[in-house]
C-alpha cells in the first residue's frame, strides 16, 4: 500500500503575507505509517511551488505547484491511497481540486481528506464524488486503520491520542532546507534565518465561540516535555535551527508543562515565539522572566475584546482585562516585544464597544496589533449560528455576520482603519522597529505591484 500525502496550494488575499510552514500534521501521519512499515511520501505543493502564483480572483492569489505539476508527481509515484490535508475552510476548494486530479490520473486510487474543515463539514465534503473518505479529528490512528485495511465506512475517527507514544514528525520526507531558505514562518517578526515549526501540545480546554480548536482536537493534551526537548535538540543538530515557531493553540495553558519546556530551552541559544496568540491568563512576571531567558522575543497577547461582557459572555475567553496593561509594560521592560489580537464586529457589540478595542490597545502600549472581523469558521460554535457557503470569502478581513448598527462596508472600513492607523503609527514611534517588523511584508507587496502578477 503506497501512500501519498498532499498539502495543497494556498489561496489568500493579495495583500496578505505569503507563508511557508512545515505541514506538521502530514509529517506526524507519515511517521506513524512509516513506523508500521508502509511506504509513504509527502508532496507539499506550497514549499515546492512557493514562487508560482496564479490569480484566483480580483482580490486573491493561489500559490503552489500547478495542477499539471501535481498530476506528474502522482503519475510518477503511483500511490494506492492519497491523503489530502484541508486545514482551512478558505482553502477547501484547493483540497477538492487535489482529489479531482488524483481521480483523473487513476480512479482506483483511494482519496482521503482530513483536517479541521472536512471534519466540520463531513456531508458536504463527501458530496464530492472524488472524495472517498473523510477523517474526523487527529489523523494518525485513523489513517493507519485505513491503510491497514481495518477501517470501514466513509467517515473515520478515533479517540484523542495519548501523545506520549507519538513518534517525531517525519521531517526527513520534506525538503527542510527549502522551508528554512524561504523563511516565511508564522511570525511576521522572526529575527532569525533558520526558523521551524514545532508542536508541544494539542487541543484547548477553553471554547471561544470563534475557534475550531476545541471541537476538532478536544481538551488540551501535552507532548511530554522531555520528548519535546529531544525534538528541539534534534532540530538544532540535524537542521541547525535557530528559532522555533511554536504552533500550539494554547501554549501557556498548563504551567507545569510550560515551565519544564522553558527551563529546558534556557541555554540552548534559540529564539522562539508563539505567534498564533498566547493566553493572557497563563502569564505573570515570573513566567515572562523565564520566557525571556529561554529565548522568547515576542508575544502576541490574545486579548480579543476590551469590553468585559463581550469577552466573557459572547466570546467566552477566561481572561482578566486588568492584567493586560501591566503585562505589556513588563514585557517591554525585559525586552519582549508585544502584539495584540482583537476580534470585533459581533452583532452584540455597540459601535462604542468596537472603538474601545482600539483605544484599549493604544492605552496598554502594545507595539502592534491585529483587529480581525468576527469570522464564522466551520468547526467553531459561532458557525452553527451563522453558517456560510462561500468558504473562500470566510476570512478575518471580510464581514460575514451583519452588524446591527453598521453596514458591512462601514464595519470593514472601520476595522481596516484600526489596523492601518495602529500599525502605521509604529513607523513614527519607532522607524527601526517598524522596518524590522514589516520589511518582509513591504518586499512582498513590491513584488505584487511590480513583479510577478
Ligand atoms: C500553522 C497554521 C496556519 C499556517 C498554515 C499551515 C499550513 N501548513 O498550511 C498559516 C499561518 C498560513 C495559517 C493561516 C490561516 N489559518 Co491557520 N492554523 C495553523 C495552526 C495554528 C496549526 C496547524 C498545525 O500545524 N497543526 C498541528 C498539526 C499536527 O495538525 P494538523 O496540521 O491540523 O494535522 C492533524 C489533523 O488536522 C489531521 N489532518 C490534517 N491533514 C490531514 C490529512 C489527512 C489525509 C488526514 C487523514 C488527516 C489530516 O491529522 C493531523 C495529525 O493529527 C492551526 C491551529 C492548530 N493548532 O491546529 C490553525 C488553523 C488551521 N487555521 C485556521 C485559520 C482560520 C487560518 C486563517 C484563515 C487565519 C487568518 N488570520 O487569515 C489563515 C488562512 C490561510 C489560508 N490562506 O488558507 C483555523 C481553521 C479553521 C477553519 N475551519 O478554517 C485553525 C484550525 C485555527 C482556528 N482558529 O481554529 N494557519
Ligand atoms: S481561541 Fe485560543 S483559548 Fe480560545 S478556544 Fe481557541 S485555542 Fe483555546
Image (tube, rainbow, N blue to C red):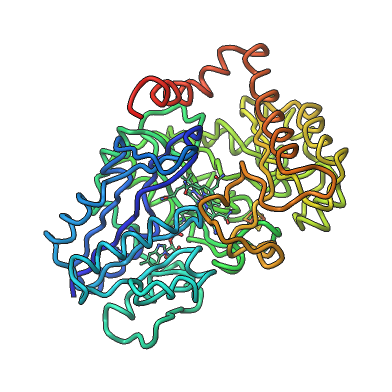
Q: For residue 37, say whether it is visible.
A: no
In this rendering, would 171 be left or right of 256? left
In this rendering, would 445 be left or right of 361? left
Q: Quarter-wise, where is residue 313 in the image?
A: bottom right
Comparing 109 with 172, the one in front is: 109
The x and y percentages for residue 302 are: 68, 44
- Report the number of discs: 0
In this rendering, would 449 be left or right of 386? left
The x and y percentages for residue 334 are: 65, 26
Q: Quarter-wise, where is residue 19 in the image?
A: top left
Q: Which residue is drawn at 49% across and 71% down?
A: 137
The x and y percentages for residue 271 are: 47, 33
Ligand 2's image quarter is bottom right
In this rendering, would 307 be left or right of 252? right
Q: Quarter-wise, where is residue 299 in the image?
A: top right
341 w.r.t. 87: above or below: above
110 w.r.t. 289: above or below: below
The x and y percentages for residue 83 are: 32, 66
* Quarter of the rendering occupied by the N terminus: bottom left
339 w.r.t. 155: above or below: above
* Quarter of the rendering occupied by the C terminus: top left
Q: Which residue is drawn at 80% across and 52% down?
A: 347
Q: Residue at x 52, y 23 (%)?
A: 438
Q: For residue 391, say whether it is visible.
A: yes
Q: Which residue lies furthest to the left in this view?
A: 76
27 w.r.t. 174: above or below: below
Comparing 218 with 351, the one in front is: 351
Q: Which residue is drawn at 27% across and 38% down?
A: 178
Amino acid at each position: 500500500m503506497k501512500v501519498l500525502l498532499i498539502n495543497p496550494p494556498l489561496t489568500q488575499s493579495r495583500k496578505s503575507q505569503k507563508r511557508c510552514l512545515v505541514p506538521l500534521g502530514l509529517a506526524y501521519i507519515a511517521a506513524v505509517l512509516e513506523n508500521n512499515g508502509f511506504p509513504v511520501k509527502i508532496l507539499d505543493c506550497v514549499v515546492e511551488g512557493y514562487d508560482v502564483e496564479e490569480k484566483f480572483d480580483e482580490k486573491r492569489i493561489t500559490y503552489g505547484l500547478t495542477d499539471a505539476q501535481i498530476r506528474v508527481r502522482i503519475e510518477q509515484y503511483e500511490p494506492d491511497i492519497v491523503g489530502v490535508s484541508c486545514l482551512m475552510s478558505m482553502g477547501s476548494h484547493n483540497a477538492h481540486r487535489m482529489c479531482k486530479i488524483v481521480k483523473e490520473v487513476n480512479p482506483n486510487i483511494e482519496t482521503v481528506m482530513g483536517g479541521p474543515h472536512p471534519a466540520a463539514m463531513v456531508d458536504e465534503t463527501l458530496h464530492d464524488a472524488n472524495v472517498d473518505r473523510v477523517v474526523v479529528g487527529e489523523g494518525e490512528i485513523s489513517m493507519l486503520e485505513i491503510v491497514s485495511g481495518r477501517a470501514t465506512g466513509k467517515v473515520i475517527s478515533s479517540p484523542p491520542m495519548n501523545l506520549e507514544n507519538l513518534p517525531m514528525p517525519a521531517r526527513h520526507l520534506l525538503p527542510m532546507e527549502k522551508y528554512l531558505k524561504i523563511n516565511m514562518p508564522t511570525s511576521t517578526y522572526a529575527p532569525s534565518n533558520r526558523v521551524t515549526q514545532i508542536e508541544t501540545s494539542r487541543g484547548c480546554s477553553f471554547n471561544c465561540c470563534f475557534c475550531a480548536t476545541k471541537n476538532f482536537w478536544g481538551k488540551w493534551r501535552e507532548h511530554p516535555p522531555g520528548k519535546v526537548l529531544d525534538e528541539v535538540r534534534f532540530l538544532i543538530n540535524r537542521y541547525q535551527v535557530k528559532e522555533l515557531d511554536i504552533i500550539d493553540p494554547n501554549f501557556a495553558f498548563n504551567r507545569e508543562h510550560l515551565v519544564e519546556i522553558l527551563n529546558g530551552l534556557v541555554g540552548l541559544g534559540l529564539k522562539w515565539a508563539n505567534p498564533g496568540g498566547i493566553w493572557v491568563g497563563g502569564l505573570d512576571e515570573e513566567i515572562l522572566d523565564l520566557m525571556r531567558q529561554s529565548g522568547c522575543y515576542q508575544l502576541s497577547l490574545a486579548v480579543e475584546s476590551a469590553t468585559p461582557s463581550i469577552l466573557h459572555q459572547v466570546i467566552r475567553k477566561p481572561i482578566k482585562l486588568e492584567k493586560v496593561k501591566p503585562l505589556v509594560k513588563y514585557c517591554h521592560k525585559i525586552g519582549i516585544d508585544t502584539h495584540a489580537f482583537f476580534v470585533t464586529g459581533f452583532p452584540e457589540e455597540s459601535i462604542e464597544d468596537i472603538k474601545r478595542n482600539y483605544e484599549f490597545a493604544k492605552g496598554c502600549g502594545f507595539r502592534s496589533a491585529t483587529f480581525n472581523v468576527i469570522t464564522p469558521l466551520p468547526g467553531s460554535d459561532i458557525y452553527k449560528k451563522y453558517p456560510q457557503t462561500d468558504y473562500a470569502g470566510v476570512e478575518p478581513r471580510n464581514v460575514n455576520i451583519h452588524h446591527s448598527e453598521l453596514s458591512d462596508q462601514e464595519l470593514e472600513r472601520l476595522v481596516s482603519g484600526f489596523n492601518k492607523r495602529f500599525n502605521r503609527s509604529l513607523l513614527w514611534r519607532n522607524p527601526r522597529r517598524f522596518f524590522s517588523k514589516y520589511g518582509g511584508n513591504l518586499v512582498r507587496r513590491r513584488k505584487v505591484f511590480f513583479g510577478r502578477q
